């Protein structure tokens, strides 16, 4: 009979994820993974496989969490337009987190050309994110805050590209005031205020 695991799998995945997020895939050693997880090599590999398999598990855990948080944030906003504006402001509201960047984007930049599985996961992740944002755009259209004729998918992709651009700019050390001005400019162009119509 198999012995039950004496560790919290989610806690280990979060610790490993933070290590990959901070250092990147190539710069993370087995010793790093053992140190942050508190597990020995045998336990780590028996539970999660090799370094690459562990990385992919951590990456999937990250995107599942991000999608859950996004789904909740978009649904809880009183008006959909507020939720869409919040999406653009998120990198400014959390400058420390934004300076780490997006683990999915970081991983795609580092590994996308060499690892088809990472690239495929990135594609599916961004398509899911786009669909969630597009649903919110459609809600804003029903609420009368966005033009009814706009293509929700096209606008969702533009918003996602703008948000990821803000995250990247934050990583360069751009100050909060400049980021805020940029986010407001993007919101004015992509999500114009129709209150005066």
Image (cartoon, rainbow, N blue to C red):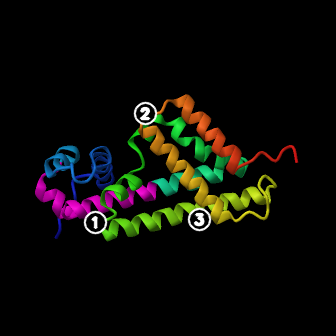
Which residue occupies the extreme right position in the image? 197
- Residue 79, given in percent of the width and then of the height, sits at 73, 49
- Quarter of the image with the N terminus in it: bottom left
Q: Residue 173 — which label?
A: 2
- Residue 137, given in percent of the width and then of the height, sits at 69, 58
Q: CA distance from mark 3 to mark 2?
A: 30 Å
In the image, the segment drawn in magenta is 39-65
Q: CA distance from mark 1 to mark 2?
A: 29 Å
- SS for dot 2: loop
- Residue 109, given in percent of the width and then of the height, sits at 36, 56
Mark 3 / mark 2, whichever is N-terminal: 3
Q: Is residue 80 left or right of residue 195?
A: left
**Is 6 placed above or below 99 here?**
below
Q: Is residue 47 magenta?
A: yes
Residue 48 figure quarter: bottom left
Q: Nearer the viewer, residue 109 or 107?
A: 109
Query: Mark 1 — residue?
Result: 114
Q: Which residue sits at x=18%, y=46%?
A: 32
Query: Mark 3 — residue?
Result: 131
Q: Main secondary structure of the magenta part?
A: helix
Q: Is residue 77 visible?
A: no
């Amino acid at each position: 009979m198999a012995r039950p695991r004496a560790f919290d799998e989610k806690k280990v995945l979060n610790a490993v994820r933070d290590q990959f997020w901070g250092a990147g895939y190539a710069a993370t050693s087995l010793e790093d993974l053992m140190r942050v997880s508190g597990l020995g090599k045998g336990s780590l590999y028996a539970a999660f496989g090799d370094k690459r398999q562990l990385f992919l598990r951590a990456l999937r855990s990250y995107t599942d969490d991000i999608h859950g948080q996004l789904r909740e944030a978009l649904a809880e906003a009183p008006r959909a337009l507020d939720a869409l504006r919040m999406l653009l402001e998120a990198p400014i509201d959390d400058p420390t987190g934004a300076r780490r960047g997006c683990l999915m984007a970081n991983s795609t930049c580092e590994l996308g050309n060499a690892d088809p599985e990472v690239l495929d996961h990135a594609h599916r992740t961004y398509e899911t994110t786009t669909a969630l944002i597009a649903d919110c755009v459609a809600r804003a259209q029903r609420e009368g805050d966005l033009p009814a004729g706009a293509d929700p998918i096209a606008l969702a992709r533009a918003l996602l590209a703008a948000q990821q651009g803000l995250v990247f700019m934050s990583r360069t050390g751009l100050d909060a005031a400049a980021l805020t001005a940029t986010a407001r400019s993007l919101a004015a162009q992509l999500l114009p205020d129709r209150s005066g119509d």
